[in-house]
Amino acid sequence: MTDPSGANAGGAGSLHWIPPLQGANNYNVWHIQMEDVLTDLDLYGHADGSKLKPNSKVEVAITGRKDDEGNRLPDLEVDSDNPLYASWIKADRKALSNIRLRVDGSVLTHIQGCTTAANAWSTLEATFQVKGTVGLIDVVDTIDTREFIPIFSILNEDKRTTFSIT
């Protein structure tokens, strides 16, 4: 049986193995797969920032107090530790660990200083997400075109062959 909290999701992601993020060339596929992994572990809200960090302290009102003679005392407000805060910290750390365990070492350097899953997630998005034509050109420039020369030679031999890049 799987642990729905994601507590056992560490171990290099034995439950959810995906190829590690290597850079812009596989970011889009990695991003979709990581959304699924984190969603399955109920941790995606930490990555996208929708699961907001609660306050570490909460005000608690103590009412109905009476003195030794039975006279009513004024209500008292005290600060108390918020149990939701500790749970949030633990879950966010699990989300951050799941992200870090699924990136290549060269990519890890970009997020090694991140202290929250949302910070790591947004840093990776800003660094590797291909945006617009210029971003696409950057990715295409990283492809080794020598692998594609034979196919282009074949296409050029048959002048009737047409193709388009969209």
Image (tube, grey):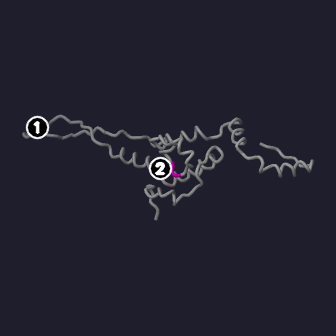
Mark with earlier residue (2, 1): 1
Q: Residues within 10 Å of mark 2 (few under 14, many from 20)?
A: some
In the image, 17 versus 44, the foreground residue is 17
Q: Determine which residue is flagged by label 2.
A: 97
Element under label 2? Answer: helix
Location of the C terminus (image quadrant): top right
Please give left or right for residue 146 compared with residue 87 in the image: right
Mark 2 and mark 1 residues within 8 Å of each other at the beta carbon = no
Residue sitting at 36 percent across and 46 percent down?
86
Magenta stretch mostly in which secondary structure?
Answer: helix
Element under label 1? Answer: loop
Q: Determine which residue is flagged by label 1.
A: 71
Q: Quadrant of residue 72?
A: top left
Give the amino acid at mark 1.
Answer: Asn
Residue sitting at 82 percent across and 44 percent down?
164
Start and end of the magenta stretch? 97-101
Foreground mark, 2 or 1, reads 2
Residue 99 part of the magenta segment: yes
The image position of residue 20, as x and y in percent, is 58, 52
Q: CA distance from mark 2 to mark 1?
A: 54 Å
The image position of residue 78, as x and y in percent, is 24, 37
In the image, 105 versus 74, the foreground residue is 105
